[in-house]
Image (cartoon, helix red, strand yellow):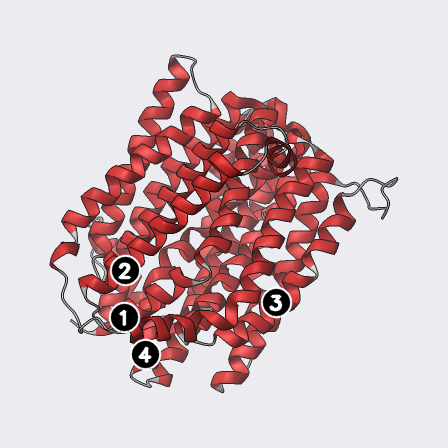
Amino acid sequence: MAPNSSIKNRFATSLAANAVRGGVNFLVALLVARNLGPASYGDFVFLMGTFVALKTLMEMGTSNAFYTFISQRPRSLAFIGAYALWQLALLALVAGTIGFLLPQAWMEIIWLGHGRTLILLALGAVFFQEQAWLTVARIGEALRMTAQTQAINLCVALAHLALVLGAVLFESLTIDLIFKFFVAEYAVAVLIAMRVFRILEIEGEPFDAKTVLSDYWTYCSPTLVYVWLCFAAEFADRWLLQHFGGSVEQGIFGVGLRISGVCLLVATSLLNIFWKESAEALETDDLARLQKLYKTAVRLAACFAALASGFLIPWSAEILRLTVGSSYSQGSMVLAIMLLYPIHQSWGTINQIMLFASGETRAHLFLNGIFLAINLPLTWFVLAPQDAWLPGLQLGSLGMALKLIAYTVISTNVISWWIGRRFGWGLDCSFQFIAIGGALASGWLAYQAATSIAAFMHLNIVVTIGCAFIIHCALAGSGLWFYPGLIGQSRKEMRSYLARTLNFVGINFSGTR
């Protein structure tokens, strides 16, 4: 099968599975947020966020190195096993430190009053979800078993939905129970995936411990300072918001981040595929293919994120009321701002993958280190009270949302400029103004048209949002048909996609006109 055809098929599989799985996970997040309430949901977000930050420090860039190495060429079972043992050793070290060594006074300062057992459960949940499962899933992607990987992912999401629904029906949903669900679900998923991918039968080049350690050191050593900066930035964001704003503000920000995450569907579906193919293109020195991969991935991810955000922003207040309840209504402005975040986050994530896949870890350290270094003072400035020793704006979740947008837009464009300069294809950024402007205009026009129709026909809010969605899709589809370059496609490719879609639903269309 031709490489491009393979990529398109794998992307279509990944996109379809992520759409279903994302929908299921989104429903679960809404159930959890609605039933826990802003305060308890804020505590849940805080604990998960602190351990996601700690995970970055624990692995020290080795997970990115591991996926890059297994994407470049086949690796042996011993290579995979050595990395698995490294992860287990880190888990044992952190769990032992929290469980037996850290004084209670330190626990109170770091996790702001949460119990040791709950903290250990949060560690286990993050480890199995973000490390153990992610490692196995990346092995599946490296083997080009995208369909199988996404099928297991979907099964995990459905199992989680069933367990959370059961807990809601029996009125027993708690933070510690959710953490236990995560541990059980992803532990089973890892065992199933190992059998499906036949990991124990994998063969590759002979394992030389000294060479492997040297490769990891070469890849990871330039990022060690960055890893600490990243940990400090992520942990500070969660800790300062919890400390100055409280669990309710944390909950509102968490809901905004979760809902805005819906707009990252295309980017999420592209990541591992782009990583694998770009690493392979670099290994074979095929820079023309690399440029096409990068441009298409950036434009697809950013443009579709913009279209999703443009549609949702006018409905921010209604979305919160319908999904998580009136207790979160004060967060409508936060959500409206947060919905802009996925646009440049999609683009920025592709940039990070590009740097990792190309082995440009020193550039990754330098560029991201600059922005991470200013993150802590920025976070303090928007969150600290006005009577603090260093006065701030005391904006809570609203300040976090504003800071996140500014940080993402600036850092993404700067890193994109560097990538274009490094590989000789210039800065490809003009499309963002057309894509964002067009998406916001389309969403606003759809909102105005739908609300006018609803006022005339006395439609309820759900039907009104549905009308707006249809209008928005029509406007966006027309724009992409006439300007397919916005998503890195040609008119010929657009005709081909349209023909296949119409033929699939039984409408004869050759796609040649």
> Residue at image x 22%, y 53%?
147
Q: Are marks 2 and 1 in contact (CB under 8 Å)?
A: yes
| The one of 343 and 351 positioned closer to us in this rendering | 351
Q: Which residue is mark 2?
A: 82
Q: Which mark sits nearer the N-terminus, 2 or 4?
A: 2
**Element at badge 2?**
helix
**Element at badge 3?**
helix
353 vs 34, left or right, is left
Q: Which mark sits nearer the N-terminus, 1 or 3?
A: 1
In the rendered structure, which amino acid carries the disc numbered 4?
A: Ala
Name the front one of labels 1 and 4.
1
- Separation of disc 2 and disc 4 at Cα? 27 Å
Q: Position of residue 269 (x, y in %)?
A: 36, 55
Is residue 92 visible in this depiction of the protein? Answer: yes
> Residue at image x 60%, y 44%?
313
> Residue at image x 44%, y 20%?
173
Q: Which residue is mark 1?
A: 209
